[in-house]
Image: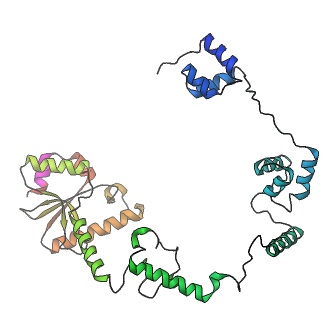
Amino acid sequence: MSYKHWTNEEIEFLKNNHKSTTLKQISKKLGKPYMSVVNKSHRLKLKKYLNYKQKLWTDLEINTLLKFYKDLGYKEIGKMINRSKASVQGKARMLKIFRGYGYKRSEECIKNLKERNYRMVKEGKIKWFTKDNNPMNNKETKEKMRKKIIEMYASGKMKINSGTFKKGNIPIKHFEKGNIPHNKYKTKDNYEPLKRVSKKLKEARKKRVFPIKDTKIEVKIQNFLKELKIDFIPHKYVSEIKYGYQCDILIPSINLVIECDGDYWHGNLHVYKDWNNLNQKQKISKILDYERTNQLEEKGYNVIRLWESEIKQMNINDFQNKVIK
């Protein structure tokens, strides 16, 4: 990457125009990156004076902030002194009176706020809800809401997959027993169709190849089989056993299953030396491997498990002696 040095003309242009135009405009005119212009202006110690005049805080404004910062919010204080909320917050930080999280109002402040709220309720500016006049606590409104939701769900206006029925959005008591959408979407009407859908999904998963890309050790064993001209099926789903899965390689002519186990994922004890050195995932995978091997052998399959470290050092003759006895 070639670095373009600043010429004397470009530096003079920056000095003459940095007050009137922005640094982005200067970078476009000079054809230089924005950060390059910023860094150069810092090195030249150029200050950008615009027509903006900072509004200084008066003694009266500071006194009002010190007087009301405990009782009123920053927005309300800003309205009193004709300043923004951010400006009041910044000044409060400078004066070290900023109210952060966990700030507790004084008892006098709480009394004043209550009096103000009661006054605003009487004037009609805000509504004050209690347990008696709150419409959400009324039994009639709750019943109406429950009936509307059930009607909309039954008519199809509210769909299961629309995101409306996510758990926690709508209370369970709004629905009748057995008609709760997020309870596995089971009802008397849709139970049978959902059963059919789950069956179709299971069949589709059987045909799906996992993983999408074969591992290096699997590819090596597949190449050995191709050289030996032995027909095989990669990632064949075995449904005859209880824990059905896709085996790595199946040779149907001799009913042989070859598993290419990674040292880490399947917990090779020759590498880790002790059962206690394995993590939880490795232990689970080892137990599953043991169960599946036993179940396959019961169904008449021959099973050979090859470790990653073993396959890496293996040649075609070693493989032929191990597999074809």
Tell me if 84 is positioned left or right of 237 in this view: right
Q: How many marks?
A: 0
Does residue 184 appear anywhere in the picture?
no
270 up-or-down from 55: above or below: below
Instruction: Give the x, y percent position of residue 288.
Output: 29, 69
Tell me if 156 is positioned left or right of 233 in this view: right
Q: Residue furthest top?
A: 8
Tell me if 157 is positioned left or right of 324 in this view: right
Q: Residue furthest front?
A: 124
On whether residue 319 falls in the magenta region, the answer is yes
Quadrant housing the C terminus: bottom left
Instruction: Give the x, y percent position of residue 297.
Output: 16, 71
Name which residue lies at 58% across and 28% down: 34
Foreground pick, 44 / 146:
146
211 up-or-down from 36: above or below: below
In the rendered image, which quarter is residue 265 located in? bottom left
In the rendered image, which quarter is residue 270 located in? bottom left
Tell me if 239 is positioned left or right of 18 in this view: left
Name which residue lies at 31% across and 65% down: 286
On whether residue 105 falls in the magenta region, the answer is no
What is the magenta range?
Answer: 314-321
Foreground pick, 262 / 42:
42
Name which residue lies at 57% across and 19% down: 30
Instruction: Give the x, y percent position of residue 88.
Output: 81, 50
Name which residue lies at 27% across and 52% down: 308
Colour pattern of the rendering: rainbow
Q: Main secondary structure of the magenta part?
A: helix
174 up-or-down from 99: above or below: below
Does residue 21 appear anywhere in the picture?
yes
